[in-house]
Structure formats: C-alpha cells, structure tokens
Image (cartoon, grey):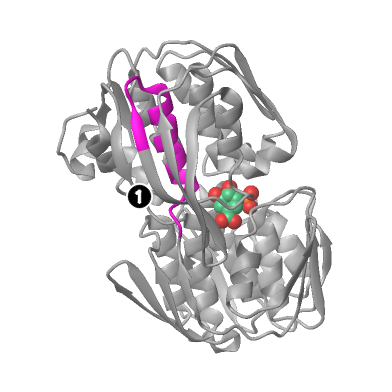
C-alpha cells in the first residue's frame, strides 16, 4: 500500500493511501490503551515503585502521564517501560495548573473518580472533542459520594472542577455498561469510607478490577456487580501490558478483506470483556486461529493467525456491544465486504465517543463510495460493495482514520485521508506497520 518505506509523518502529510496486493508477516501491535491508563494511575496512588512494561506510548496515554506528573508523581520513561514512584493515594498534590486530558475520555473520567476521593481542588480540561462528551455519567454518582463537582451546562460538560475528599461508599446501579463509569466510582471508593458497589446492565471491560488485585486490593465480583471496601492501600507492582486487541482489530480486518494475506499478531490481550471482535469474525466466517494462550499479569493473551476470508453478514446487538464497542467502525467496514446485509443495534453509546461514530463512520464510508443507513442506535450495511476511493477525513477520530486506511487496502482508487495524524491517539506507528506488512 501507499508509498513504501516512508515514516508515518510523511505518510500523514501525503495522506494518500492506496491498494495493496496482500498483507504478510508477523507483528506485535502496541500495548493496550485501557490497561496503560490504569497502570499509570494506580502506580501513582500506590506505595512504592511500579514498573509498567510495554506501555502504550500514544497521545492519550501520555496525557495521563502528564496529569499524574502534575499531581506530583515522578514518572520516568526508559526503553519500553515506565518507572512510577507511587506517592500513596493521599500523597497526590494539589496542582497549580489545569490538568489537560487532551483527547482522552478515559483520562478525564477515571481521574475524576480518583480526584473526587481527595481533599484537593483540581480542574480537568481537554480538547474540543472532550468538551462535547457527556460527563454527568461520572459527576452525578461522584457527587452522590460527597464530592463537589462543577462543570459547564450544569456539570454535564468539561472543563470540570473538583473539590473532593470526605467521600462515602455508594451502592450504584449504572444505567449504562461503561468501564469508565465503573472505574471512576471504584477509584473514588478506594479512598472513601465504607463499601462501594457498582452494578452494570452488562459487564464492561474489567481491567480496573483485575489490576487492583495485582496492586494488592481485595475486589469482590459477582456477575456484573463489583464491590470494594474503602481505605485500602495499594502496593507498587510490575505490570506487563499486552498488545491492544482494539489496535490488532484493524490489522485483523485488513488481512481478512485483502486478497493474498496471511498475518500473525503476537501477544494480543484476550480479556473476555474485549473479545467481541473475535466472536464476530468467527460468526462472519473469517479464518482466525488463536494460538499459545497464556496469562500476562492478570490478563489472558494469545497469538492470532489470520488470513484472507470470505465473509458473511451478521446481526450485532445486545450484550456483545460493550465487548466490541471500539471495534464497530472497523466492523462496519468488514460488513461492506460480506455476503448479505449486516445490522448493528443497541449501540447508541457510539454517539458519545471521540466523534458521533454512527454518523462519522457512515459519512466517511459514503465519501469513499459505500452505501450505509444509520439508525438511532446503529447501522444497516449492505455487503459486497466495492470501495471507489476519494476524499475522506478522520474527523480527528483515531479509529475512523485507521478504518479509512484499512479500506484503502482494497480501494479501486486511492483514498485521500485528511487529519490522518489522529491515529497517534492510540496507535502512532499504525501507518508504518500497515506499510511494512504490505506486499
Ligand atoms: C474504556 C472504556 C470504553 C471504551 C474506551 C476505553 C476504558 O468507554 O470505549 O475506548 O478504558 O475504560 P466507555 O466506558 O464509555 O464504554
């Protein structure tokens, strides 16, 4: 694809992605974004040193690093590891500046929970996308725990200012299956009096719960209910971050739809709360094999072998949605190549991501010649469509940018992707990696 041997920056300036004759080789995609964010935050509030190996060095995770540094935590980046000198939860210091979360929803929502438990004053701000995303889903329960949180539009939108401390445990029934909401409440619960219990309609990703155990915290779980006792101390530890299945998903999709492809993706995190994409690929009839299953610091991992496949359409709805929410843009592209019509339902949460991903995916697919119908909570996509190419835009959304670059692998004419640098939010070497696998 594209012009060979160019670095991502040049590709970005060029912004033009072309068809490839096949993807071949072995790749380890970068570390998991959700796990990296959590390791940095928990490392900061633990006692003693935490080492995070294979951390994701992307814009989003570096926003979390900077926020924790602004709260007084010393963090050194050496080789592929972060060395975090934890201050203990109460050791975080009131910053003398606004904390900047950049484009990262996980940073603002999880940090809100963490800071709500502390008697300090903080202000959290971010980019224009962050300032559009709903915050009451975290600020409401945190207020109920006793934190004072003010934001724009009656506290619904960032910037948020938080005066925390003196919080009490809560029994919270979340109306949505959101790991960011669950984690924010649990983090505040850690420094609150009493017990904190969160129940979700379906189980969302459980990296926080797993990692807390690694830091020596007792966590109880039953079904989609999780409970912790307040005032527990975290002990610094070592975290090995698996390769991010949400990044691997783009390579899996590229290999599946591009003729003459055969890829091996190494050490991919296969936490069952994240593997909806593998279930869907299986139901679509894709050739994906899971090899060498093992466990890496509380998280299951494996190597994935994938090759070009004939796909059939699927209906996607219900409790699988939280297990593949971030993969729906690339699944939409897969659907365009399948036999039959794919429907996606129960995914209204997509409207509150980095962009309104229902409209953004549909708009960008249309820009490259694909017919897509949107519904309030999903999409209807006819299969066996050819991709014409043309002018498209990531709209500042990393996953839309990567979806378009994958589309270019089988596009009749090149795709010009504006604002392609957004891929740096979660996968800075994406274009170089895709290029290195291209025949
Ligand atoms: C994330 C949770 C999900 C996901 C996001 C990362 C996390 O968001 O879409 O990319 O790390 O907790 P929600 O909690 O809003 O579902």
Q: Is residue 53 visible?
A: yes
Q: Is residue 424 above or below residue 87?
A: above
Location of residue 246 in the rendering, given as x and y in whole percent from the top left corner: 49, 45
Quarter of the picture containing the N terminus is top left
Location of residue 363 in the rendering, given as x and y in whole percent from the top left corner: 49, 23
Instruction: Report the span colored magenta.
Output: 242-263
Q: Nearer the viewer, residue 413 or 115?
A: 413
Q: Is residue 304 above or below residue 16?
A: below
Residue lying furthest left? 5
Location of residue 328 in the rendering, given as x and y in whole percent from the top left corner: 56, 34
Q: Nearer the viewer, residue 241 or 95?
A: 241
Please report the residue visible at 26 percent of the width from the left and 23 percent of the height from the top.
20
Left or right: 102, with 110 as reference point = left
Q: Quadrant of residue 180?
A: bottom right
Q: Nearer the viewer, residue 393 or 155?
A: 393
Please report the residue visible at 56 percent of the width from the left and 75 percent of the height from the top.
122
At numbered mark 1, what does the secondary structure look like: helix, strand or loop? loop
Please report the residue visible at 79 percent of the width from the left and 83 percent of the height from the top.
193
- Check if residue 432 falls in the magenta segment: no
Q: Is residue 194 above or below residue 196?
A: below
Left or right: 235, with 138 as reference point = left
Q: Quadrant of residue 211?
A: bottom right
Identify the residue position indicated by label 1 in the image. Answer: 28
Count neighbours of disc 1 (C-alpha within 10 A) and say few if under 14, some if 14 to 19, many if 20 or more: some
């Amino acid at each position: 694809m594209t012009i060979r041997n160019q670095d991502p920056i040049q590709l970005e300036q060029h912004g033009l992605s072309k068809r490839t004759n096949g993807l071949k080789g072995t790749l380890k995609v970068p570390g998991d974004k959700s796990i990296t964010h959590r390791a940095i935050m928990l490392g900061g509030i633990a006692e003693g040193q935490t080492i995070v190996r294979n951390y994701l060095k992307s814009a989003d995770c570096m926003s979390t690093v900077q926020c924790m540094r602004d709260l007084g935590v010393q963090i050194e980046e050496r080789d592929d590891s972060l060395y975090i000198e934890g201050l203990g939860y109460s050791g975080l210091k009131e910053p003398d500046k606004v904390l900047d979360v950049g484009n990262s929803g996980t940073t603002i929502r999880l940090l809100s929970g963490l800071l709500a438990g502390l008697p300090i004053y903080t202000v959290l701000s971010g980019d224009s996308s962050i300032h559009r995303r709903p915050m009451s889903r975290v600020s409401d329960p945190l207020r109920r725990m006793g934190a004072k949180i003010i934001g724009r539009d009656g506290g619904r939108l960032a910037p948020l200012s938080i005066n925390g401390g003196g919080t009490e445990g809560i029994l919270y029934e979340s109306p949505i299956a959101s790991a960011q909401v669950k984690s924010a409440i649990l983090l505040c619960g850690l420094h609150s009096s009493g017990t904190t219990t969160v129940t979700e309609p379906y189980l969302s990703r459980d990296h926080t719960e797993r990692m807390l155990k690694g830091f020596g915290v007792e966590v109880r779980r039953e079904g989609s209910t999780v409970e912790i006792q307040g005032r527990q101390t975290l002990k610094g530890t070592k975290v090995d971050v698996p390769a991010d299945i949400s990044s691997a998903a783009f390579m899996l999709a590229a290999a599946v739809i591009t003729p003459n492809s055969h890829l091996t993706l190494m050490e991919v995190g296969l936490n069952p709360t994240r593997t909806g994409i593998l279930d869907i690929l299986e139901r679509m009839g894709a050739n994906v094999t899971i090899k060498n299953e093992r466990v890496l610091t509380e998280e299951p991992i494996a190597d994935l072998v994938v090759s070009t496949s004939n796909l059939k359409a699927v209906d996607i709805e219900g409790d699988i949605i939280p297990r593949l929410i971030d993969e729906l843009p690339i699944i939409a592209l897969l659907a365009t190549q399948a036999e039959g019509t794919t429907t996606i339902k129960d995914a209204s949460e997509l409207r509150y991501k980095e962009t309104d991903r229902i409209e953004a995916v549909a708009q960008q697919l249309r820009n490259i010649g694909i017919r897509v119908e949107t519904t309030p909570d999903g999409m209807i996509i006819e299969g066996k469509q050819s991709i014409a190419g043309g002018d498209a835009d990531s709209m500042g959304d990393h996953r839309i940018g990567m979806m378009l670059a994958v589309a270019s692998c089988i596009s009749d004419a090149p795709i010009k992707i504006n604002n392609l640098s957004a891929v740096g939010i979660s996968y800075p070497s994406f274009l170089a990696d895709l290029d290195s696998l291209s025949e």
